[in-house]
Image (tube, rainbow, N blue to C red):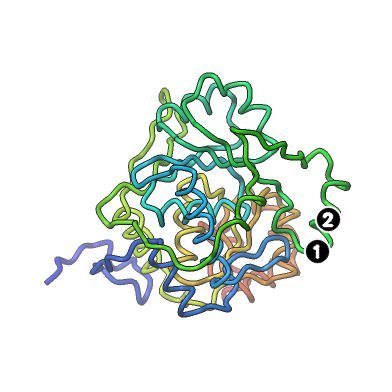
Amino acid sequence: MAEDRIWYASYAPGVPTRLDYEKTTLSAALTRSAETFPNRSALNYMGRKISYAELNGLVNAFARTLADLGVHPGDKAAVCLPNIPEAVIANYAIFRIGAVTVQNNPLYTERELAYQLNDSDAKILITLSLLLPRIKKIWGQIRSEKVIACNLNNYLPVPLKQMFPWVRRCMYRRIRESADVLSFSKLLPRYPDTAVEDQSRWENLGALLYTGGTTGKSKGLMLTHANLSSNVQQFAAWFPDLKKGEESLVGNFPIFHSAGFTAIQNYCIWQANEIILVPRPEPRNNIRILKKYRPTFLPGEPPSLWACWQIPTLLKSIFQASKVSFPGPPRWLRTPFDA
């Protein structure tokens, strides 16, 4: 019998005091979600929706891409991207071939990126085309063999995809392929999206997430597939009212950060829920998403959500549509709509 703890009394109804962990890796969880909810939207990127069946196929194709480029089980593959579909596709393809995903902040300086890429021994780097000039400056200092570049408009809906290079010229950079630089959008169609062998193993290393480096150089936290899966199962248990295949979550936290990696990307994949991807979590973007998509799960730090709370009609609609705000607004802002 589990020992009672005084903090159990503070648990919300339905939250268990202990868990029996299911030994399912996140790559296997994606396959399960694709089989159980094939038509459910997995990713919503500015209105372009990618179903779980499609996402699983894209992961299979990119897994073959990486393997063909020489990425083997145990190798490190760095992902330096904002919240765009390629970030999720890359992470789960890396999981699937038994390699290790390394998360890097795309806002980092050349010195910071060079340190993390060398410290992690990243064999390959998946990043934005906009960052190629920065990578070029440190190419002779790092051990990575190839760069796979992505453009922000690859998965935008029509006609935004076609218009993007013209109306957002400062955010678009044409990818000039070479022996070292490859294009994500050109690589993927070369490989089939049929099932590949899942080489992720419960006890093996799955990810390196770097600390912020506030007390010195940033450190890569070594997370096994057991760590990653168990953490997601804990998160799912903490929110028993959120149902599998029914929820829609605003992807405010960056996936390269532990909060976004676990509570947004991995949690939603595990639960077969929708991620509304937010590359730039600005207040105006959140307001647009809340009005247009009426998500059921709104993550975000209180300061970043402040603009939303200032609009009374929008605030009320948030609490009518959303089951959870994590970590949520101050208590006094919830009070008017508690009844």
Q: What percent of the width, then of the height, locates residue 113?
A: 53, 28
Quadrant in the picture for residue 148: top right
Quadrant in the picture for residue 31: bottom left
Quadrant in the picture for residue 213: top left
Q: What SS does tag 2 mark?
A: helix
Q: Which residue is mark 1?
A: 158
Q: Amino acid at mark 1?
A: Val
Q: What percent of the width, then of the height, locates residue 204?
A: 28, 50
Q: What percent of the width, then of the height, locates residue 142?
A: 49, 24
Determine if residue 296 is in view.
no
Please tell me which residue is depicted at 45% across the width and 59% down the height of the picture.
266
Q: Is residue 262 left or right of residue 287?
A: left
Q: Residue furthest left?
A: 1
Q: Amino acid at mark 2?
A: Gln
Task: Please determine whether, in this image, residue 278 is positioned above or below residue 215.
Answer: below
Please tell me which residue is depicted at 52% across the width and 71% down the height of the picture.
273
Label total for image? 2
Quadrant of the drawing holding the C terminus: bottom right
Task: Please determine whether, in this image, residue 4 is positioned above or below residue 251.
Answer: below
> Disc 2 and disc 1: Cα gap in Å?
7 Å
Q: Is residue 224 left or right of residue 131?
A: left
Please tell me which residue is depicted at 62% across the width and 41% down the height of the picture.
182
Quadrant of the drawing holding the N terminus: bottom left
Q: Which residue is mark 2?
A: 162
- Closer to the camera in the image, 109 or 20: 109
Question: Dots 2 and 1: beta carbons under 8 Å?
Answer: yes
Q: What percent of the width, then of the height, locates residue 63?
A: 48, 55
Determine if residue 156 is in view.
yes
Task: Please determine whether, in this image, residue 108 is positioned above or below residue 190.
Answer: above
